[in-house]
Amino acid sequence: MQRARPDAPQVAIIGGGYAGMACAVELVRKGARVAVFERASVMGGRARRVEKNGLSVDNGQHLLLGAYTETLRLLRHVGVRPSVFYSAPLDLYYPGKFRLTAASLPAPLHLAVGLLRAHGMDWSERRACLRFIQHLKAQRFRLPVHLTVSQLLDNATQPKRLRRFLWEPLCVAALNTPAAEASARVFANVLRDTLAAGASASELLIPKIDLSELFPVPAARWLGRNGGQVYVTEAITEIVPDGARYRLEGDPVSARRFDHVVVATAPYHATDLLSPFATLAPLVASIQALPYEPILTTYLQYDDSVRLPAAMIGAEGGLAQWFFDRGQTVGPAGLIAAVISARGPHLDIPKHEVELAIHNELETLLDRRLPPADSILTITEKRATFACRPQLARPGVQTAQHGIWLAGDYVEGPYPATIEGAVRSGVQCANTLMAGNRSA
């Protein structure tokens, strides 16, 4: 790691989520002087700890995959140990209906053996699954930009049951976009780096700690030990040009100036900071045009008699798509998280009716009456991710305004809006910024 020289660039990062903290760590590693400004008291952005109704949970149920190479690299770098994860082979489990578990073997045996052991699939469906992966490999996972996931599945003649229990749930889980609208090209990137890459890449990694403590907080501690600065509860309201530099309104040291500013907020907050710059009007318009999809997560705290047959199970036919038994991974026994990704009828139903429906669906899945939940917390992120549609225009990390940069899960990249996508954007921003600074 390079130590910052007195003439090293001074960089302000607005936003202490995964993208902003990844950018900050990478910049300090390359010798920059960095200050991070986070408006909230809890770090993590849209992947953070929430405390309400007697529960301390994440603002949405997230999991990582073994393919999240940049996230795992930075976790190691800031001192987070692998034991922080509950890890298991990819397991798509719909009790009584379908189960596909990847084997702990090199590719392609992990999938082939998993298909041999699968439940709820006949031989023609097993062959169709392998044929689909071979179809993608034959195209080197490079698909036409206009293609949707549904069209891809049609072209590959995938059976109804595979679509229902495998491809479409994976699409919604990864892209947070219905298969009929989702980008086949981005979905292929996800499959390339997970199912087609080997057992370790497709491994499920569920954090045993909250998402704030997983990376943003350890990254802040690491920055503090290595010359970086992190300010929380500091809402930056304006980026003000000051000669060849920039001053931040809301900066606790008002006389301080920065050579570069990285806007690492959610896209709908970024436009407020970027709008005053005439050079960025087209960029602001493109960000404002981004479509969004919601994610709803309901946490139900039961007594310790309530336990799922696996740490994660799928559901279909109701509102909830996935149930997570937090008692088997991170939370207290009896804590269940139900997830509903993307748009749906649940958005038009009162919250208490959604919670009752999820409780009833859980009873049906477990085939038993459940005690009333001691605590219930529903968190709806209405703009959780951008809608990952074909030919969607996503901005790059470098803007038309010299010294103003972007980082976030919505910037241009191979992945949808995921933790890995956010981290990669932060790393890319840091690398591009420092490369330009060296050549200036």
Image (cartoon, rainbow, N blue to C red):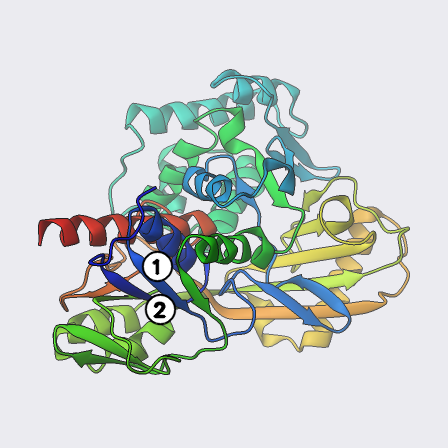
Rendered image: mark on residue 267: 2
Q: Quadrant of the N terminus?
A: top left
Residue 317 visible at all:
yes
Name which residue lies at 41% across and 33% down. 193
Amino acid beneath label 2:
Pro
Q: Is residue 179 above or below residue 371?
A: above
Counting from the top left corner in percent of width and height, residue 159 is at 51, 34
Quarter of the view holding residue 61: bottom right
Q: Would residue 78 be found to the left or right of residue 100 on screen?
A: left
Query: Local crowd at mark 1 within 10 Å, few (<14), some, or many (≥20)?
Result: many
Q: Quadrant of the C terminus?
A: bottom left
Q: Element type at marker 2?
A: helix
**Contact? badges 1 and 2 (CB < 8 Å):** yes
Which is nearer the N-term, disc 1 or disc 2? 2
Q: CA distance from mark 1 to mark 2?
A: 7 Å
Counting from the top left corner in percent of width and height, residue 187 is at 39, 43
Q: Please give the residue where the numbered disc 1 appears in the rendered image.
A: 410
Name which residue lies at 24% across and 70% down. 258
